[in-house]
Image (spheres, rainbow, N blue to C red):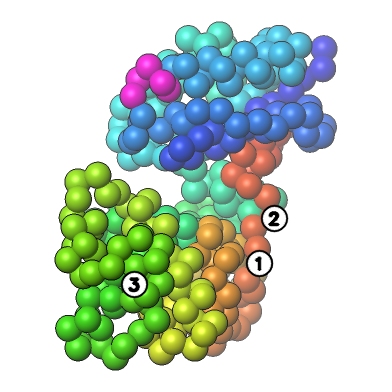
Amino acid sequence: MKRYVAGLDGGGTKTAVTVADENGLVVHTFTSGAINYNGQDEVSIRHSFQEIFDTVARVCGGLDHCAQVVIGAAGLSNPTVIARLESNVRESGYQGELFIIGDQETALCGAHDSEYGIILIAGTGSICYGKNEYGLSHRTGGYGHLIDDEGSGYSIGRDLLSALVQANDGRLPETIITDMVYEQLQLSSVQQIIGFVYDKRTNKKDIAALAPILSDACERGDKVALTIAKKSALSLFEIVVPVVEKLSLQKGSLAMAGSVLLKNSFVQSAFVDMLKKGYPDLHCIIAKNDASSGAVLMALNRLKD
């Protein structure tokens, strides 16, 4: 009987799924609803799992042909989440081997095609995670926008809004950021900006959605924007340092992922320059594959073991 494995990346708004045969050949990829208990209700999570495993069953010719499932999920610091996720999986009909792990580990594995190395993710939030060949791991950042996520899209969006109000009252020089933020939000005064920021309906993704403005403003040579880009790069470098030092990973490669690092050339180049100066033998790469591919690789490794 031919065997298959499935890897799930449980993101904030959707779940990416990759199915491969036991030789590592990818046979199907698809997306389904979110399975994140930090932002979804029990009913929608249960529905997403049922949809996922119905599809896996169809692709594999039955769930009994799927020998290993690895799920990379957020929110595992909550001790009840793993048990709840496993319960959802079993209720969906899958009774095979199951491994549930933090999504930073599957992201690392996908980024390097290996379970070892360092990954720095700067999207809406920011986190750095590393694992060395002795099995030791360390994670920095990723504690949420209220107390952390420095260098992230949210952090940049907040800095852009801060620059607007500070330029308005004279603490900063005039900046093109002001008009660019007004245009994107379709607002025209600081009072309206304050209303937007403190509206209970405004969430972290709304603030992070302003981050692409930074690239445009930097390209036009705006000094305030360039300062924000350097600050963001420094913040990202600072969350990398403890991972490198604690795991003795001064040599090798660091994978970059997330929209801030991949789409903002100013933040990326400033960060890469800092890393070269601090750790000349640690090279930056773009993540090779996504976290669901990483979950599949982990599933294949467990199948071999």
Q: Secondary structure at mark 1?
A: strand
The reply to whether residue 15 is in sight is: yes
- Residue at coordinates 46% horizontally, 31% vertically from top-left? 34
Q: Amino acid at mark 3?
A: Leu
**Left or right position of 95 against 197:** right
Question: What kind of residue is marked 2?
Answer: Lys
How far apart marks 1 and 3 lie (CA) works out to 28 Å
Q: Which residues are magenta?
A: 41-45
For this view, does 231 lie left or right of residue 202? right
Q: Is residue 43 magenta?
A: yes
What residue is pinned by disc 3?
Answer: 160
Tell me if label 1 and label 2 are in contact, CB under 8 Å: yes
Q: Are marks 1 and 3 in contact (CB under 8 Å)?
A: no
Sequence order check, earlier mark of 3 and 2:
3
Residue carrying label 1:
285
- Residue labelled with disc 2: 288
Tell me what residue is drawn at x 63 percent, y 54 percent.
111
Disc 3 crowd rating (10 Å Cα; few below 14, some 14-19, many 20+) is many
Tell me if mark 2 has few (under 14), some (14-19) or many (20+) residues whose alpha carbon lies within 10 angstroms of its own.
Answer: some
Would residue 1 be found to the left or right of residue 133 on screen? right
Residue 201, position in %: x, y?
A: 24, 44
Disc 2 on helix, strand or loop? loop
- Determine contact: label 3, label 2, CB under 8 Å: no
Percent x, y of residue 196: 24, 56
How would you rate the neighbour count of disc 1 (Cα within 10 Å): few for under 14, some for 14-19, many for 20 or more? some
Quarter of the view holding residue 197: bottom left
